[in-house]
Image (spheres, rainbow, N blue to C red):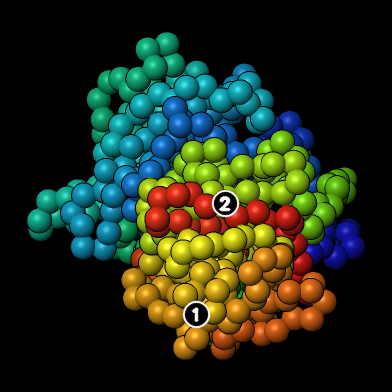
Amino acid sequence: MTAEPPTRQGVTVTNPILRGFNPDPSILRVGTDYYIATSTFQWYPGVAIYHSRDLVNWRPAAQPLNRLSLLDMRGDADSGGIWAPCLSHDGELFHLIYTDVKSWGINESFKDSHNYLTTAPSIEGPWSEPVYMNSSGFDPSLFHDDDGKKWFLNMVWDHRAGHHPFAGIVLQEYSPAEKKLVGPREIIFTGTEVRVTEGPHLYKKDGWYYLLTAEGGTSWEHTVTLARSRSLHGPYEVHPQGPLMTAVDAPHLPIQKPGHASFTSTPDGQWIMAHLCGRPLTTQGECPLGRETGLQMLDWPEGAWPTLAQGGHHPVEHVQLPALPPHPWPEVPARDDFTGSELRSEWMTLRAPAELLGVELTGAGLRLHGRESLMSRHSVALVGRRLQSLHARMRTELEFAPDDFQQMAGLTAYYDSRNWVYLRVSHDETAGRALNVTSCENGVYREHLSQDVSVGDSGPVQLEVTYSGSTFQFAYSTDGETWQPIGEPFSAGLLSDEHCGGLSFTGTFLALTCQDMSGRRAPADFRWAEYTEF
């Protein structure tokens, strides 16, 4: 994110403030610390929590779902797994509500969305063993009322023929003593005519209960809807001015898809809204960076409805936030030599902990023991990080000695198991150890070079992928100085929600990976990796 010098009114920040795949933000203030939790879907560890003290500078603070007892996504569908977490605090403990969606699809009647609760005394943990809540729908949240009671909400999924699948927002009391939901379940809100009502969050202010929801789906029709009631149980009256925020009528705006919002306040009573957003390459075009997180300021007089501080209902790219004391964090080095005892927080694996997927830190680099193909949803030796800019480069140095065409390793731009582009080192019967660029586009596999390019029988190979706006291209080097482009440029939109099935939910990752379909688990050693933006 970028920020201009503070003005009398505040500091101007450019959205999104969490760049690259960071959807469904749940924002929370505890004292003078601000936290945002975002969805991670099939990426592991589950849930990304960021921390700020000035609303401008954010750093990764926790990845709480980091052990199998809390989360095991092996076999989960692409864009399944962690949907829309909710982070809250009751004065003693952090509470994290999350969903693990095991199966879902455009034409599938069922979701199998299991909702859980884990708690911790601090944001770093330790996080408790999960409490199972229900499986009636996704986008759960927890509301702590001022009388001490806790209330669980989620949307209800109706699989029956002839019924709208988004059946409304359900409310039920949660008993911390019994560690279960108790009492009756009741639908408190069925949404507006926009429908597709999800993402509920409850807030209490000036004697009113405010119910914040997302409507219209998570693409161009995405909408922030607000309703309120004097009673927790309703009925809820919808904001008289219509949507609190949407861009459905403004496709020209650089910030699109605003929705799935949450609120927090500053100590002096100013209100901020975090929300999902996307930045398309063209008007309502493809969003290779996925769904990101932005902030907007609210005007919220006592007893009145809140409105966007800038007026209207459109998100702004440059937003004025309160001028809190600046609090930058230390810069993270662009180059990672993998010399620590654990992976740095930007690196993630697919569906399971790194140690179960053939990932090893040797002290001299990152070793990946070949596992299943990139089309697998079970056991893939892959370590990736978010692409956060369309002007970026990743480089790595690989030592790998395959002796079989079923063994390969290299650098991939990855969206999901059906969509990726891969510069891989493998073995060819004629060329020996050699390179090729392969891809999978909505399940269709291709090899882009008619002949593999030999890189000699031994020695390190440097690999590179560079994003230059609307395209990306791979390159390689055998001496670390002279780089040779390999293959043709690809459209950046190839790896986007819009291109990859239309209802997929993750952005592009750049990843190191290794496969061995022969079952011998050949090792690939990555000596370093470097991600830079320009």
At a point 41% along the width and 28% down the height, the residue shown is: 151
Tell me the residue that label 1 is attached to. 430
Between 356 and 42, which is closer to the camera in this rendering? 356
Q: Position of residue 6 (x, y in %)?
A: 88, 59
**Image quadrant for the C terminus?**
bottom right
**Image quadrant for the N terminus?**
bottom right
| Image position of 404 with respect to 214: above or below | below
User: Which quadrant of the view contains residue 293?
Assistant: bottom right
At a point 74% along the width and 56% down the height, the residue shown is: 528
| Gap in angstroms between the C-alphas marked 2 and 1 | 22 Å
At a point 76% along the width and 67% down the height, the residue shown is: 532
User: Which quadrant of the view contains residue 277?
Assistant: bottom right
Q: Residue furthest left?
A: 161
Three-letter amino acid code at the position of disc 1: Thr
Between 69 and 288, which is closer to the camera in this rendering? 69
Left or right for 484, reference 334 = left
Left or right for 117, reference 305 = left
Left or right for 351, reference 17 = left
Tell me the residue that label 2 is attached to. 523
User: Which quadrant of the view contains residue 431?
Assistant: bottom right
Between 50 and 261, which is closer to the camera in this rendering? 50
